[in-house]
Image (cartoon, rainbow, N blue to C red):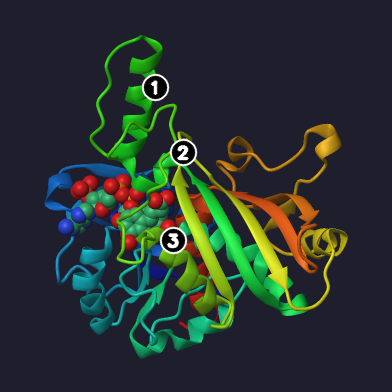
Amino acid sequence: MAEKQFNVAVAGATGAVGNQMISCLEEMNFPVKSIRLLASHRSVGRTLRFKGDLIPVEELKEDSFKGLDIALFSAGGSTSKTFAPNAARDGCVVIDNSSAWRMDPHVPLVVPEVNPHAVAQHSHKGIIANPNCSTIQMVLPLSPIHKKYGIKRIVVSTYQAVSGTGKKAIDELFDQSRAMINFLDCQNNVYPHRIAFNCLPHIDSFLDNGYTKEEMKMVNETRKILEDDTIGVTATTVRVPVFYSHSESVNVETKKPVSATEVRSLLEKTPGIKVVDDPEQNLYPLAIDAAGQDLTLVGRIRDDESIPNGINMWIVADNIRKGAATNAVQIAQVLVKDYL
Ligand code: NAP
Ligand code: 3JN
């Protein structure tokens, strides 16, 4: 029997994540019958390539989703809040990359290797949420550890690439770096401070509790995906002058006794993960190695000698691919295989 094919839209198609979504649909051989590329009115007149064809970019409107099966959204939270319910009402399942719907109890928040079963809940609202990039790459290795040893507490610090802020931030790091090495003045428009040759402990806006929204996304989303509100999570999120791939230093405290050797062998068997952990040979996960591919790299796995059941590790993944576009297309794959 011929494989079923689907009418698909990408909303935010001209952005850093949207562009990667189009490539992922192609690379991952998603069964696309037709594709609509949507963005703001500013992009009307542009074309983007899909499987060799030039597709016109259309303005995202209320009626853009009639006759469509699946829409991948990456056009910002307010756009998702406005348009995702319209799409769902027209029978098009939305896979949304923004934070707009992630914590809605009726919306599944999915990392396909971790909680594919949650997709079943999509029929409630017709919306499935893709987690924040920093959460995705962290829960991937932590999920098997939680299942086997029970996680009590997670302490994470992130080192996030500028591509997480979109195309304008990639340009800003490039322009500032070029200005700096030529001893020229440089301007900052995207971040409140210079990002070139600097680190900013500030991602998304600050909340009343002193944490940033990005930090609290990691806390709340991790608990939702691992389906355990008792896990203690505390995060410090930092923007670093790297173009692609987020890195994370993660400390985990478990309920049952655990060792670095056990964690290493558990993660070696975990789909979606590549253990890169041979410090003698200077082998550990690097942003430049994670960029451009879909595996989450884990290394520097060590016993935390300061507590009885603690592990330290270093986790790196391409934030635009596994952290956003690849994860969204993987969700779509689960959806069409089991639910559409
Ligand atoms: P970006 O490069 O700035 O692209 C933004 C995209 O949204 C562009 O296609 C833009 O279209 C479109 N857009 C903006 N306002 C719109 C409107 N009113 N109507 C229709 N389209 C509109 O940003 P990005 O890095 O791709 O990120 C886009 C969104 O994805 C973010 O806001 C965030 O919600 C989500 N995201 C999620 C993760 C994650 O952790 N999973 C990571 C990064 C981003 P024009 O080109 O026409 O302006
Ligand atoms: O900054 C990063 O590295 C990830 C950025 C994610 C992001 C950027 C703008 C808006 C998000 C997100 O996915 O949480 C949002 C949002 O709140 O939708």
- Amino acid beneath label 3: Glu
For residue 333, above or below residue 228: above
Within 10 Å of disc 1 (Cα), the crowding (few <14, some 14-19, many 20+) is some
Pointer 2 local density, CA inside 10 Å: few below 14, some 14–19, many at least 20: many
Q: Which residue is mark 3?
A: 215
Q: Which residue is mark 1?
A: 177
Residue 150, horizontal then vertical, whole percent: 71, 78
In the image shown, does 33 or 26 lie closer to the viewer? 26
User: From this viewpoint, which residue is outermost toward the front?
Assistant: 306
Going by the numbered disc 1, the residue's amino acid type is: Ser
- The image shows residue 296 at horizontal and vertical percentages of 64, 53
**Circle 3 crowding by C-alpha within 10 Å: few under 14, some 14–19, many from 20:** many
- Work out whether 155 lies above or below 51: below
Q: Secondary structure at mark 1?
A: helix
**Residue, disc 2:** 240
Q: Between 56 and 180, which is closer to the camera in this rendering?
A: 180
Question: Are the residues tagged 2 and 1 within 8 Å (C-beta)?
Answer: no
Q: Is residue 270 visible?
A: yes
Picture quarter containing residue 103?
bottom left
In this rendering, position of residue 264 left or right of residue 244: right
Left or right of 251 in this view: 317: left
Give the amino acid at mark 2: Val
Compare marks 3 and 2 and give the one earlier in the sequence.
3
Give the spatial CA distance, label 2 vs label 1. Answer: 13 Å
Residue 104: image quadrant is: bottom left
Instruction: Name the N-terminal-most of marks 2 and 1.
Output: 1
Of all residues shown, which one is farthest toward the left? 41
Q: Quadrant of residue 52?
A: top left
